[in-house]
Image (cartoon, grey):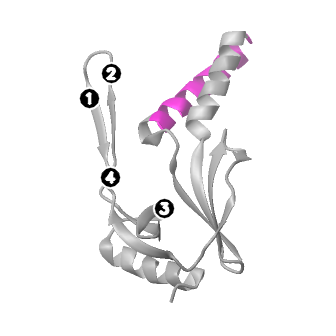
């Protein structure tokens, strides 16, 4: 059984929103004004920024994990990794902060206060498996992932 978890947008929440706005506005300009090379480039750029995301696929039958980046919302990349005996799962606090500084010196910051379930290889963080909101939910998911990957 293969389970899929969406992790995050590749360009963060601000870049993803900007990409979707660029994509939508360039499609509307192509429909109502004219089709130009600049509009086509804006569609490609907007689709790349707005629709690219990262996912985790877990194959519990074969004990494999695949970190995948979906480019343009269609093309999946990444390779399957076998889960071996020196791997374990754990909980980490997420300290990510996305920040944009505009041309008028306005700062927009989005801080994450989530926890993440991490796969460790030889005691070092190797791959993020899932983001959760609370420590209680993280402990439940930690047990679930340990059972799913056969790490009793």
Q: Which mark is residue 107?
A: 1
- The Cα atoms of the two marked residues, 1 and 2, are separated by 7 Å
Position in image of residue 39 (x %, y %): 67, 15
Q: Are marks 1 and 3 in contact (CB under 8 Å)?
A: no
In the rendered image, the vertical position of residue 24 relative to residue 133, given as above or below: above
Residue drawn at x 66%, y 77% is 63
- The Cα atoms of the two marked residues, 1 and 4, are separated by 16 Å
Q: Is residue 73 magenta?
A: no
Q: Residue furthest bottom?
A: 152
- The Cα atoms of the two marked residues, 2 and 4, are separated by 21 Å
Residue at mark 2: 102
Residue drawn at x 43%, y 68% is 117
Residue drawn at x 71%, y 81% is 61
Specify few, some or many for label 3: CA neighbours under 10 Å numbering under 14, 14-19, or 20 or more.
some
User: In the visual, does 55 lie left or right of 37?
Assistant: left
Is residue 89 visible to us here? yes
Position in image of residue 95 (x %, y %): 30, 53
């Amino acid at each position: 059984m293969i389970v899929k978890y969406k992790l995050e947008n590749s360009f963060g929440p601000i870049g993803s929103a900007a990409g979707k706005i660029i994509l939508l506005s360039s499609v509307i300009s192509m429909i109502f004004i004219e089709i130009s090379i600049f509009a086509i480039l804006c569609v490609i750029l907007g689709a790349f920024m707005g629709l690219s995301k990262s996912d985790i696929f877990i194959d519990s039958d074969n004990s494999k994990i695949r970190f995948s980046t979906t480019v343009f919302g269609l093309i999946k990349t990444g390779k399957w990794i076998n889960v071996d005996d020196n791997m374990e799962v754990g909980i980490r606090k997420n300290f990510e902060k996305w920040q944009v500084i505009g041309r008028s010196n306005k700062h927009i910051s989005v801080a994450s206060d989530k926890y993440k379930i991490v796969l460790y290889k030889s005691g070092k963080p190797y791959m993020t498996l899932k983001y959760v909101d609370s420590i209680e939910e993280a402990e439940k998911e930690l047990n679930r992932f340990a059972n799913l990957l056969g790490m009793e």
